[in-house]
Image: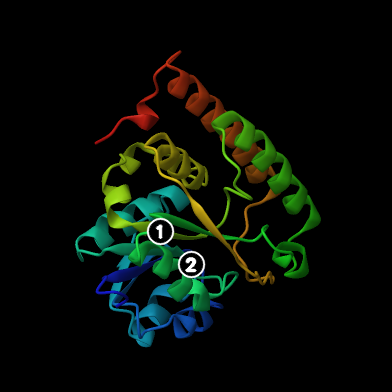
Amino acid sequence: MLNNKTIVVVLPAYNAGQTLIKTFQAIPKDIVDHVLLVDDKSSDNTVILAKELGIQYVIQHDKNLGYGANQKTCYRESMKLNPDIIIMLHPDFQYPPSLIPAMCSVIAYNNYKVVLGSRILGKGAMQGGMPLYKYVANRILTFIQNILVNQKLSEYHTGFRAYAIDVIREIDFDNNSDDFIFDNEILCQLLMNGHNICEITCPTHYTKESSSIGFIQSVGYGFGVLRVSFQFLLHKSGLWKFKLFNRP
């Protein structure tokens, strides 16, 4: 607990058996009140390990629903725990859980309500092993999206985020994609609602166990980012309204 704030870490997991132990053990338990893992029907021992580690809340989908659908379950279930802050952390140990106190402090002391762990602010991405094509695609997509949504973020694609609970409650995330573009949609929803986004530099560690989408999926994700960006621009300007930006 930090400044009397209840903090919940959600882990959207899929075949995370090789990295889950390191990730969970690195979570600072002195300030985190609850850890919730949602498994998207892994084919490995993720669920067994989660229970052996003593993770308080472990939920498994009956079938593989997709990355976005996994996060939807994460947020719905975490809201039942009455948190003040939700941390979304990929359980592949690509991002350092040791940054959780810093990210939560930004929210707990009322500086921002949304915090991203950015791989791009420093030199952590390439030094941490991010593939060159992913780095280049990240920079190009971010440049275009910043223009279309009138922001100056270093990236929109990180899997390490902190949200104040009230910003999650005010968006209709259940209508978002069940796929990887969910992450981009939720940020644009928050920007549409007028929230500023804080970024802190985040070193990364890419290994063969790190979660990653394939080239074909990456191309589809890239077009999805452009779609969401243009929808944001049209909705914001009043030229066209999109269900994505409706409030619940």
Q: Nearer the viewer, residue 163 or 40?
A: 163
Q: Is residue 243 left or right of residue 248?
A: right
> Do tag 2 and tag 1 residues touch (Cβ < 8 Å)?
no
Q: Does 144 appear above or below 110? A: above
State the residue at coordinates (46%, 85%): 25
- Cα distance between the residues tagged 2 and 1: 41 Å
What is the quadrant of residue 53 in the picture?
bottom left
Q: Does 248 appear above or below 49? A: above
Q: Is residue 229 left or right of residue 208?
A: left
Residue 66 in view in this figure: no
Q: Nearer the viewer, residue 11 or 145?
A: 145
Q: Which residue is mark 2?
A: 43
Q: Which residue is mark 1?
A: 111
Residue 173 in view in this figure: yes
State the residue at coordinates (34%, 51%): 72
Please, what secondary structure does the residue beneath circle 1 have? loop
Picture coordinates of residue 49, whole percent (x, y): 42, 81
Please, what secondary structure does the residue beneath circle 2 have? loop
Picture coordinates of residue 233, whole percent (x, y): 52, 24
Picture coordinates of residue 170, whole percent (x, y): 27, 43
State the residue at coordinates (52%, 32%): 228
Q: Does 227 appear above or below 167? A: above
Q: Does 117 appear above or below 68? A: below
Location of the C terminus (image quadrant): top left
Q: Is residue 25 left or right of residue 107?
A: right
Picture coordinates of residue 41, whole percent (x, y): 41, 61
- At label 2, the amino acid type is Ser
Q: Label 1 neighbourhood size at 10 Å, few (<14), some (14-19), many (20+)?
A: few
